[in-house]
Amino acid sequence: MKIALNGGEPVRKEFLPFFKPEISNTEIQEVIDTLKSGWITTGPKTKQFEEKFAEYIGIKHAIAVSSCTAGLHLALDAIGIRPGDEVITVPYTFCSTANVIEQMGATPVFVDIDPDTFNIDPSKIEEKISEKTKAIMPVHFAGHPAEMDEIMEIARKYNIYVIEDAAHATESWYKDHKIGIIGDITVFSFYATKNLCTSEGGMITTRNDEFAERMRIMSLHGISKDAWKRYGKEGSWFYEVVDCGYKYNFTDIQASLGIHQLEKLEINNLKRKAVVTKYNEFFSGFEECFIPITKDYVKAAYHLYPLRIDFSKLDCDRKEFISALSSENIGASVHFIPLHTQPYYINKYNYKKDDFPIAYNEYTKEVSLPLFPSMTENDINDVCLSVEKIIKFFRKKMSVIKKIDNKDLNVRSIKAKEYIDERISKIASYFTPEDFDALHTEAEMKVMELVLETISIYYEDEADDYVKDNFDKFIDKKIIEMSSSVV
Ligand SMILES: Cc1ncc(COP(=O)(O)O)c(C=O)c1O
């Protein structure tokens, strides 16, 4: 079957995006209510959302902020990160994890990942700890929790903090603990593609009163407590700027989405899990594919479906594979381009790809497939069929080409060579040895041409028939031509 990239029929007519936010009428009505209320920035609904989120996590403080990036920045400030400090994290993450460390004047010290989960490999953390290390910042990649027992133990041993980048991990559990209550500070993302989405936004959780107060103040210009109330009835016109803070507050419009998104989180997680289960069943049947691993002691948030593909077994690279998916009308992405391969980090730290070989190697294989709760059976099937179609197409090409190792004979397929020998030997006695050699060479060339022609058109079963059919036509014509010249 011809792939759409080469002019074939696409699997789907409509484009299936990599992610679709699940915004229902309830959220829309709540946003309208907020817009009509006259209080559209940080206000009562933000407070309500924070309270609901704190209750959902089971923690004392939940502070809503403008993004996870902002939250991570505030967290580093709260634990007192200073220029020259070091924070341990992974290169396999979105840039904001490390960028905020840089912005504090500190150094992100990368630790390679565990290839099973893409998360920080705890066995490699201690060798990176120095006098300057102030914190470990694990990332719960794709919603699969990092190994928090080991991470917390190391942090306690060296008396350093743990700030969790839980951008992907709303509704993840590590053993008996929900993500959000384990480390000193945890930060979630509510960005458009996230499991709980408020378009942009984030939430910080902590049980530490001092950190919470500092982060609240710094999230709004460093203005003393409850500054957001200053235009309300119970607010005061008087405020003091106690530190040089940021503008990282959350709005009631965002909270209107968040309050209802939170209610649907668990059910949406089950829907995500159902998609993942179907994908896993299907893709485990392909020798080129490695399905994501979920440890049996965690509950994953299934934020992403990071399929890994062994491109060395295909005659295409990832770029072509993702273009081919797009031509079949399937959206896909890559998570993540490791930070040690990004120009800023290369220029500053002179990193080489092999400095974090596992992160780099896993990155070369990763393709994130569409995953969102409202995916239908048809959507899931279309993704599966498209991946299968593309893999078979490029696999076939590869396996035919692999047969091109019989250089002496100049024949591209052993099977085809056997076929020529069988056909030609039957008529050998009619020809002089020179004529026979000429026919043989020409036949081999023809088969080679046919094999190559089929590479980009057919799968193997069809390709064999195609080669045979066309070879028969060729040889019959040749025999007639040559026998008439012999006679
Ligand atoms: C691992 C990780 N950390 C942090 C962030 C930043 O989140 P936000 O866009 O809410 O700042 C992202 C965003 O995608 C992420 O994937």
Image: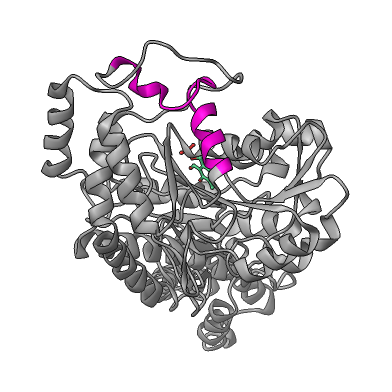
Q: Quadrant of the N terminus?
A: bottom left
Any magenta on residue 230? yes
Q: Nearer the viewer, residue 264 or 33?
A: 33
Q: Name which quarter of the figure residue 393 lies in.
A: bottom left
Q: Is residue 394 visible?
A: no
Q: Does residue 469 sit above or below 379 in this rendering?
A: below
Farthest residue, direction right: 131
The residue lying at 62 percent from left, 76 percent from top is 436
x, y percentage for residue 247? Answer: 48, 22
432 lies left or right of 29: right
Which x, y percent locates residue 369? 40, 56
Is residue 206 in the magenta section? no
Q: Residue 267: horizontal and vertical position, in percent?
A: 24, 63
Indicate whether 292 appears above or below 304.
Answer: below
The answer to whether 268 appears left or right of 96 in the picture is left
In front here: 479 or 120? 120
Residue at image position (58%, 78%) is: 417
Query: Which of these two is toward me, 447 or 474?
Result: 447
| Furthest residue in direction top, as rendered | 237
Quick one: 212 or 314, which is closer to the camera? Answer: 212
Residue 226 visible: yes
How has the structure been colored for display?
Answer: one colour
Q: Could you tell me which residue is drawn at 85 percent across and 60 percent down?
A: 127
Q: How many marks?
A: 0
Which picture quadrant has residue 86?
Answer: top right
Per the picture, the main secondary structure of the magenta-coloured stretch is helix
Q: Residue at x 73, y 58 (%)?
A: 112
Q: Position of residue 204 (x, y in %)?
A: 48, 44
> Does 50 appear above or below 395?
above
Q: Which residues are magenta?
A: 210-231
